[in-house]
Image (cartoon, coloured by chain):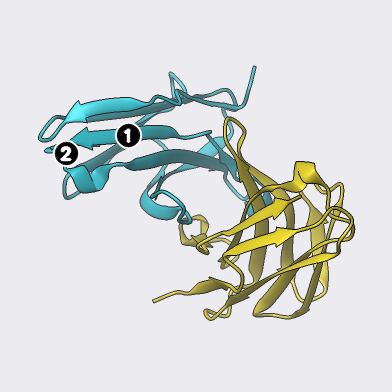
Amino acid sequence: DVKVTQSSRYLVKRTGEKVFLECVQDMDHENMFWYRQDPGLGLRLIYFSYDVKMKEKGDIPEGYSVSREKKERFSLILESASTNQTSMYLCASSWTGEEDTIYFGEGSWLTVV
Amino acid sequence: QKEVEQDPGPLSVPEGAIVSLNCTYSNSAFQYFMWYRQYSRKGPELLMYTYSSGNKEDGRFTAQVDKSSKYISLFIRDSQPSDSATYLCAMINYGGSQGNLIFGKGTKLSVKP
């Protein structure tokens, strides 16, 4: 079974803190994604990566950065957390050219106070 | 006009009912159409995947694509309480980067015993 693992399920952070969300996949997927999901707004792409050290901005990259030093690991970084970044964050991964193979992790619930 | 429109519901049906979930879209270039199921506080999981027009059946689930009307549907026969979840449609154009996968906002379904 494909596994996309998000290391932190629930986090509470203070405004201004630096936050790291980690994601690991075990299927040798080229592509990895970070989404956030908010009620009424649906899933919005923050960043995606199609190869190690490669990244592309999604729809809402402001306030976020990413790191992909190894193929299996994709990190989302909030340099200075703000309350409007309180959300559910979803990591996903897939093979290139196989649109039916986008697998999601369980999600990380971040609350910024 | 938004690229993908999906009625958020909530939709409440009795056990055993036939459920119809729908999405409309505006981009005629979309060729791949997916339905994801998302249980509360979990990540989305791929349920059905269809390429171009036509029907696809998998057990109690049928996915239907009408490209002429830019309309996709997911039918659930003999609905069960375990089908209670949010259903997300998603679509992408042929050869498109998976970073361009577009999601609907989801329809929340509740199946009452």
The image position of residue A97, as x and y in percent, is 57, 61
The amino acid type, in three-letter code, at marker 2 is: Ser
Q: In which quadrant is the N terminus of chain B drawn? A: top right
Name the quadrant containing residue B15: top left
Q: Which numbered marker is on residue B63?
A: none
- For label 2, count other residues whose C-alpha is less than 10 Å away and answer few (under 14), some (14-19) or many (20+): many
Tell me the element at label 1: strand
Res. A9 in view: yes
Instruction: Check the residue under mark 2 and report the chain it is in.
Output: B
Q: Is residue A6 above or below residue A15?
A: below
Which chain identifier belongs to the yellow chain? Answer: A
Q: Are marks 2 and 1 on the same chain?
A: yes
Q: Is residue B97 visible to us here? A: no
Image coordinates for residue A21, horizontal then vertical, percent: 71, 67
- Pointer 2: what residue? B79
Residue contact between numbered discs 2 and 1, judged by CB atoms under 8 Å: yes
Q: Residue at x 11, y 38 (%)?
A: B78
Residue A41 spot, x, y in % from top left: 62, 33
Q: Nearer the viewer, residue A85 or A66?
A: A85
Q: Secondary structure at mark 2?
A: loop
Q: Mark 1 — residue?
A: B109
Quarter of the image where one finds residue A44 = top right
Tell me the amino acid under the disc marked 1. Answer: Leu
